[in-house]
Amino acid sequence: MAETLAPVKPGRLIIDGKAVDAASGATFTTVNPATEEPITTVAEAGPEDVDRAVKAARAALDGAWSKMKPIERSRVLWKLGDLVLEHADELARLETLDNGKPIFESRYVDIDMVARCFHYFSGWSTKIAGDTTPVNPSLFTYTLREPVGVVGAIIPWNFPMIMVGWKAAPALAAGNSIVVKPAELTPLTAIRIAELALEAGVPPGVFNVLPGKGRIAGEALVKHPGVAKLSFTGSTEVGQHLMRTAADSLKKLTLELGGKSPNIVFADADLDAALKGATLGIFYGKGEVCAAGSRLFVEKSIYDDFVGKLAERAKKMAPADPLDPKTRLGSLVSKGQMEKVLGYVESGVKEGAQLVAGGQRQPVNGKGAFVQATVLAGVNNRMRVAQEEIFGPVLSVIPFDGVDDAVAQANDVPYGLAAGVWTRDVKKAHTVARRLAAGTVWVNMYNFYDPGMPFGGVKGSGFGRDLGEACLNEYTQVKSVWMNLE
Ligand code: NAP
Ligand code: MG
């Protein structure tokens, strides 16, 4: 039975604690990729709005926010985590409408992560501290850890609200203010979370949101001299462009970019668990996951059998209505992304890979950017489907022969975001974890995240870390104070 759902109200910019139209009056339409129908209109920020938001963020920082005691900042951030949980159904529905991901994921995984970010980092507000250093008995020498200032956060469409949690929670806990530019395809949840922040007691101007185009609003944020630090998650090409542009104003920068992560199954692994982990590693989030285990390395002695079972599992994962709680494979974020993914499947087959599951668009109720769970076997690590990020539910399975071969092939890629290792041999697990060029290694598990564990890449996957104590370095700067006691 179809639920009667409230219409989604038009999205507006959140500047200085108020929902406002763009200075130019421009709007755009955000679309549900599963039904291809418009969801609502959203105000489209331009350079003038960026300037207003950055100035409001600076004023709030110099005013109410920096005057708040850390324990008070902690309380409002904890309260924001609570409000995210209280509005879980509403936020999850917005996320699924905008992005096409299964409501199961947005309601039970993404919401939980966003709330945990605010709860976890709320505790850091009172614990970010400098130290004293014994330079000389006649001096008092100590450090202060201060907020960097106004943080610009530019985020992608694959985890729109999780990315708000990853960036806003530590930035605010460390005492900064923030201007968030959500992806043009998925602006709705960032706006709603900024409204909840106000309700939680975050002072107006501390948490601003500017939906709009990367080339316009994003670019203006990157160039704005009032922004002290940029936290970017997105593609490698845009990341490189941001780094060049940000050089002019010497902004602090963290870049979380793409990935082509290896998931390595040794013959001595618990193969049922590895099978589940390989499936989850690539089909979770429709494979539009930066850390997706998109290159599956399987040891030669078990290769044929494992691929057979994988294909069987994939064939059972039919895409379905994202709003149905039973659905585990939703719609890709757009028709454009669908075409890109199907193009990669074609290129893999042309280069000699065997299509053993999926490979086709599979509309639901005649519509949508749905792509079947796809497995390409017999892939060679030099093929495009093994080297380039597909960002869709397409798994490339590659055989290997022993530890050295597994590590050499796994590292032979421009990226280094994450990796998985499946084995019952503890020594092998630790050795391989050390030898893999990746920011995260999962052993006998895949695709797990926690606000306490740092996340980020090496090589083409970028630098700097989100989450964990490590990310607080990105959101603070150290001041050394020397005092003469003589
Ligand atoms: P994208 O095109 O790089 O966009 C990311 C964000 O940057 C969007 O908000 C986009 O705005 C904005 N942007 C685009 N051009 C810009 C410019 N010239 N100046 C300033 N901002 C600009 O990536 P995407 O297509 O949204 O996301 C997919 C990519 O992100 C994949 O490659 C994936 O691997 C990567 N990703 C990485 C991680 C990670 O943690 N490492 C996580 C998720 C995704 P518009 O939406 O208006 O274009
Ligand atoms: Mg949309």
Image: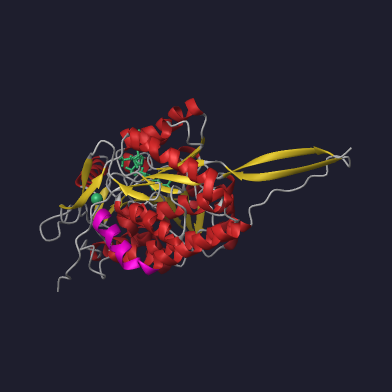
Assign the magenta stretch its main secondary structure.
Answer: helix
Above or below — where is 12 with respect to 305? Answer: above
Horizontal side, residue 147 vs residue 329: left or right: right
Q: Residue at x 44, y 67 (%)?
A: 82
Q: Is residue 58 magenta?
A: no
What is the x, y in percent for residue 174? Answer: 56, 50
Residue 151 visible somewhere in the drawing? no
Q: Nearer the viewer, residue 92 or 50?
A: 50
Q: Nearer the viewer, residue 333 or 218?
A: 218
Q: Quadrant of residue 382?
A: top left
What is the x, y in percent for residue 180? Answer: 40, 45
Q: Is residue 98 magenta?
A: yes
Q: How is the image coloured?
A: secondary structure
Above or below — where is 443 with respect to 136? Answer: below
Q: Which residues are magenta?
A: 86-99
Q: Nearer the viewer, residue 306 or 188?
A: 188
For the image, the number of numbered tags is 0
Q: Residue at x 43, y 50 (%)?
A: 204
